[in-house]
Amino acid sequence: FEILAFPCNQFAGQEPGSNEEIVEVACTRFKAEFPIFDK
C-alpha cells in the first residue's frame, strides 16, 4: 500500500501554489515521504 499525492486546484481553489511550493510545504511542514506529482 502506497500513498500518492496528486495536487490540483479544481476543488474550491484549495491548492493555488506552484509545484515547488506544494512540495516544499508537504515535505518540510508535514514531513511527507510519499510521491507528490505535478499538477
Image: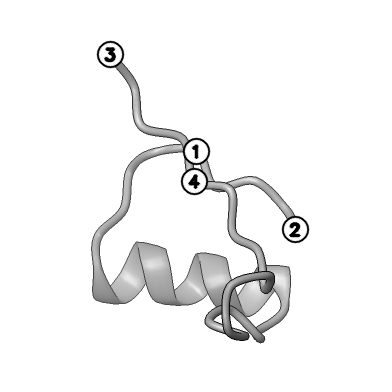
Q: Which residue is mark 3?
A: 1
Residue type at tag 4? Ala
In-image side of 39 versus 17 (left or right)? right
Q: Which residue is mark 1?
A: 35
Q: Quadrant of the N terminus?
A: top left
- Residue occupying the point 55% across, 72% down: 22
Instruction: Give the number of the mark in front: 4 or 1.
Output: 4
> From mark 2 to mark 1, how far is it between C-alphas?
13 Å
Residues marked 4 and 1 touching at CB (< 8 Å): yes
Q: Quadrant of residue 33?
A: top left
Q: Which residue is mark 2?
A: 39
Percent across and percent down for residue 20 are 67, 72
- Residue occupying the point 50% across, 38% down: 35
Q: Is residue 13 above or below residue 35?
A: below
Q: Quadrant of residue 30?
A: bottom left
> From mark 1 to mark 3, how far is it between C-alphas?
13 Å
Q: Secondary structure at mark 1?
A: loop
- Residue occupying the point 65% across, 64% down: 8
Instruction: Give the number of the mark in front: 2 or 1.
Output: 2
Coloring applied to the structure: one colour
